[in-house]
Amino acid sequence: MTLKVSDIGEKELVKYIISNSKEITPDDTAITQLNSTNLISTCDMLIQSRHFPQNMSYFDMGFKAVTVNVSDLAAMGAEPLGFLLAIAIPKDLELESFKDIIDGVLSACELYSIPLIGGDTNEASEIIISGTALGLCDNPLMKDTYEIGDVVAVTGDIGHAALGFNLDILDNVYVKKALKPIARINEGIEIKNKGATSATDITDGLASELYLIKKDSFGFMIYENLLGISDEYKQYCESLDLSYLDLILHVGEDFELLFTIPKDKLDDLDIEYRVIGEVTDSDVIELTLENGFVEQIKNKGYEHYVSE
């Protein structure tokens, strides 16, 4: 039987690339020693039919292309340095639409203080935007450098974008989170400077990210009553016949930071955050439900080639 890429999925493909290249850092970004610091670099490609909802504006397409890359810098605690833009567009795209995309890119670059320094253009049958973000960081935050007893925290509400993708109401906090996510670049620098032991950004769902950062003999206990799930959120999910825990755990696109930090360092943080659990020695990833029952969290999240 001949295997196809859909038989193994994106994460296994990435593992294959990493295992065959001695220079790749298996983290959110590449890390290259540069004089007395480190060059932090990352690239992310967005394809119109896969990554942009139909109700997303051209401006927000451009804005998101910067956000997804800067979010990786944030997960390392890096200071932004520059952004490169490669964009392919259909030849019959209206000029104003192209300008709206670029305006979105430039607006995001201004927000994150990361100048647009170059790139490339090409023709394609649909809009494809590939960004490369560069940053600098002396001691980048890694994914798996936590210790037993550290608390697990996030920089904001999670699951909001996942719900927003299912709503048609434009003037809604959940839809806004889905269509125009914000990278937590300042929060990433803050948690790095104030003692965080590891970090990553939530793109494919909380569960997927927890499994991605898990190391042998370590585990995580997450508490449902600490996830900040509002009654309104639950009501929206019920009306749409959706599981609110499934959206929070397994969908993603929040671009919040998931980080670990010693409990005695929490008071030093000058950002908004939410403690959602703790690092354990259980070797499993578990969720304590509101009713007190404990269940193991499934390793499921969005993945290219296998996700619908």
Image (spheres, helix red, strand yellow):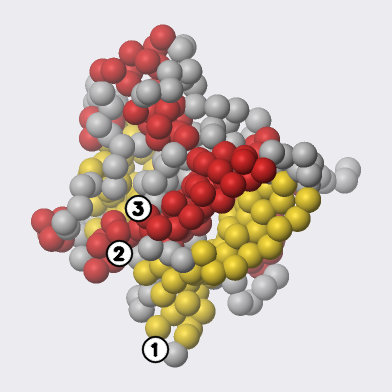
User: Could you tell me residue 79's position as x and y percent?
Assistant: 37, 69
Nearer-the-camera pick, 154 or 181: 181
Look at label 1 and name its amino acid.
Answer: Ser
Tell me the CA gap for discs 1 and 2. Answer: 18 Å
Look at label 2 and name its amino acid.
Answer: Ile
The answer to whether the residue labelled 3 contacts the one labelled 2, judged by CB atoms less than 8 Å apart, is no
Q: Is residue 113 left or right of residue 50?
A: left
Secondary structure beneath label 2: helix
Q: Earlier in the sequence, mark 1 or mark 3?
A: 1
Which numbered dot is residue 184?
A: 3
Tell me the CA gap for discs 1 and 3. Answer: 25 Å
Which numbered dot is residue 16?
A: none
Residue drawn at (40%, 83%), measured in percent from left and top?
37
Outermost residue, right side = 1
Residue drawn at (65%, 30%), measured in percent from left and top?
308
Q: Is residue 208 left or right of residue 294?
A: right
